[in-house]
Amino acid sequence: MKKLKPLVLAAITGTTLMMPTNVFADEPIKVFVDGEKLDLSVPQVVERGSTLVPFRAIFEKLNFNVTWDSNTKTIIGTKDGLKLQMQINNTSAIVNGEAIVLGTPPNIINGSTYVPLRFVGEASGDVVAWDGINKVIQINNSAASEIPKDSENGQTQEPAKLEFLERNKPYTSKENDMTVVVTSINVVDKGQFYEYSITYDQKNNTSDKAIDEATFKIYYENGESEAQYGFFGKLMPTESITRTYVFKATKSQIAYCLEYGTKTFFSTKPAADSLKWEVQ
């Protein structure tokens, strides 16, 4: 069994402020199903780090027979002994009678019904691969999914290796001058999902100014990332505080990086000079 790499960010203890979550990608992501491009009548949406696409386009491309129950706002897709049910704004999907927790639920945006692309692809039994360099998502029947090569030099580029910090050691953020100590990242298997918690200390080391708290963001091995949540208070000069997040996550993604910062909401990869810890 592959070693778990815990995810960080979701439900938060204490007072929270949720940032806007629906973002139309500035640079459209290209989606291919078994080598054929998925044509979309409306643009895909990035919500909380997950790519959402119009439900009928992806369901029909994956050869589902699809119906829409307008009374319950439920999408029903069937094929080859598989039945998939997803309801608008419901974080549980039903796959052959079994409830599965979703990281991002289906949603209606500008009159169009969107579903999380990765979940639908994997629920259909296909392999989903992400090429962060070329911004391409491939869904294939075979595990031998080939990531497209870089269009300029014909070579697949590997992401730069990140330098992770140690836990229980203080580091100062260049963004807000706050000293941060990550003391623990814990994971508990809850059956259908993992429950995670992160505990960290923050300290304002200045003697003459209040500092806004920053937040964390999680990055996944497949190139996706989880939108930030956090505590948006201020620390007075010399003030320190201990914070703890408690949250749930699906088992379909593997987290590898926890980043602290004030400008991470729209980022697609960790910054070179930010504070980063390995999630393992």
Image (cartoon, rainbow, N blue to C red):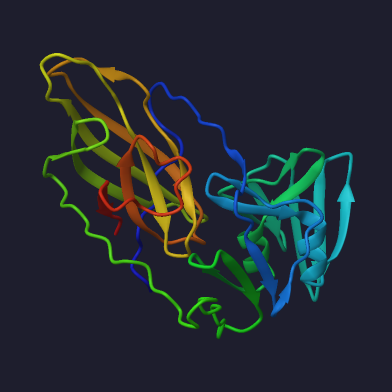
Residue at (55, 76) in percent of width and height: 151
Q: Is residue 132 above or below residue 264?
A: below
Q: Position of residue 133 (x, y in %)?
A: 48, 67
* Residue 212 in the image, given as x and y percentages of width and height: 30, 23
- Residue drawn at (41%, 42%) of the image: 9
What percent of the width, then of the height, locates residue 251? 49, 59
Residue found at the very far front of the displayed protein: 152
Left or right position of 33 against 215: right
Query: Between 172 and 243, which is closer to the camera in this rendering?
Result: 172
Q: Which picture quadrant has residue 182?
A: top left
Residue 2, quarter of picture: bottom left
In the image, is residue 177 above or below residue 39?
above
The one of 48 and 81 positioned closer to us in this rendering: 48
Residue 101 seen by the camera: no
- Measured as percent of width and height from the top left, residue 102 is found at 59, 50
- Whether residue 79 sits left or right of residue 214 in the image: it is right
The quadrant of the picture occupied by the N terminus is bottom left
Q: Quadrant of the C terminus?
A: bottom left
Residue 172 shows up from this direction: yes
Give me the residue at 82% from left, 58% from top.
56
Total number of numbered discs in the rendering: 0
